[in-house]
Amino acid sequence: MTCVTTVKYRIRVNGFSALLSKAEEEGRIHGIRICRAAPSVSHLLFADDSLILCKAKPAEAQQLKDILAIYEEGSGQLINADKSAVMFSPNTKDSDRRGVMQALHIRSETMNEKYLGLPVFVGKSRSSIFAYLKERIWQRIQGWKERLLSRAGKEILIKAVAQAILVFAMGCFDITKELCNQISAMVARFWGNNQDKEGSMHWIGWEKLVCSKAEGGLGFRDLHSFNMAMLAKQAWRLLQNPTSLCARLMKAKYYPSSDVMKAEARPVFIHVEKHMPGH
């Protein structure tokens, strides 16, 4: 029964994807490009979520509404407008915003900063963007302090919970070495403190604890090194699957004439204004 349901779901999803692709080919809707040489992206499907990308124009919203109506009629499923939302780019006119939302009958304009638990927009201050990870770990540790935990119990909680919270984000972003060090220091304090003494002395440095047990440590993760390893895994996927959508987008944007191994960081220019005394 599960297999039949899965096949039917895939058929419906493939049909919806084909409708959107055909509309884009005919010029009825337009996807987005991250740069001129990049492929156009009109939709992304993840599990039961559908992200549809098009111009913020009432005419394209109406085309999308027609496609959804065809999908509803063919699949027998209805789109829940109450659970749907629209996200606009900052420079979208108010009239276009209202027109798109009216055409789609969606009343909610999402202002969420996260999708699937990760930030949607990452600016220059990555430490502040990913500060929520530090806060989540801090809240967990505060709850653990109320319990009588043995050393073995602390070790299990640190490895299975505290450091595991970071895995998903580290697989996609460089959360900065500074933030990794702050989280490591917080976890180290939790490990070193006795149950009745908050400021007890740490007899073993954290640098030793992150070593493997064969080397005399406890096998805790060096968070920054682990972050780099997770990102290296993503780079390996780009090398192994150069025709994937992600690989083609990254190549067009960051290394159009080479490969990911030869990509270079782009310089960041900072504008500094000088003012004369008294101005």
Image (spheres, grey):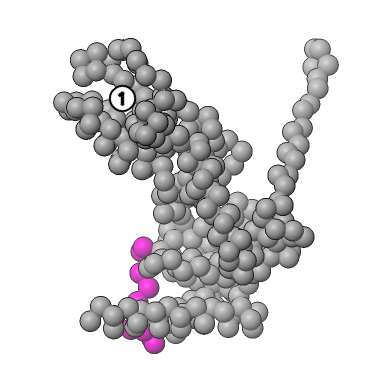
| Residue 216 at x, y percent in the picture | 37, 28
Q: Does 165 appear above or below 61?
A: above
Region of the chain picked out in magenta, as a range: 72-83
Q: From the image, which quarter does the C terminus lie in? A: top right
Residue 80 in view of the camera: yes
Q: Which residue is drawn at 61% across and 78% down?
A: 24
Which residue is nearer to you in this view: 184 or 67? 184
Which residue is nearer to you in this view: 244 or 207? 207
Question: Which residue is most to the right?
Answer: 276
Q: Residue at x 83, y 16 (%)?
A: 276
Describe residue 91's horizontal placement relative to residue 43 as left or right: right
Describe residue 34's horizontal placement relative to residue 164 as left or right: right
Secondary structure of the residue carrying tag 1 is: helix
| Residue 55 at x, y percent in the picture | 61, 67
Crowding near pointer 1: few (<14 within 10 Å), some, many (20+)? some
Does the stretch in magenta take in 74?
yes
Q: Does 110 appear above or below 271?
A: below
Describe residue 239's horizontal placement relative to residue 195 as left or right: right
Question: Which residue is most to the left?
Answer: 148
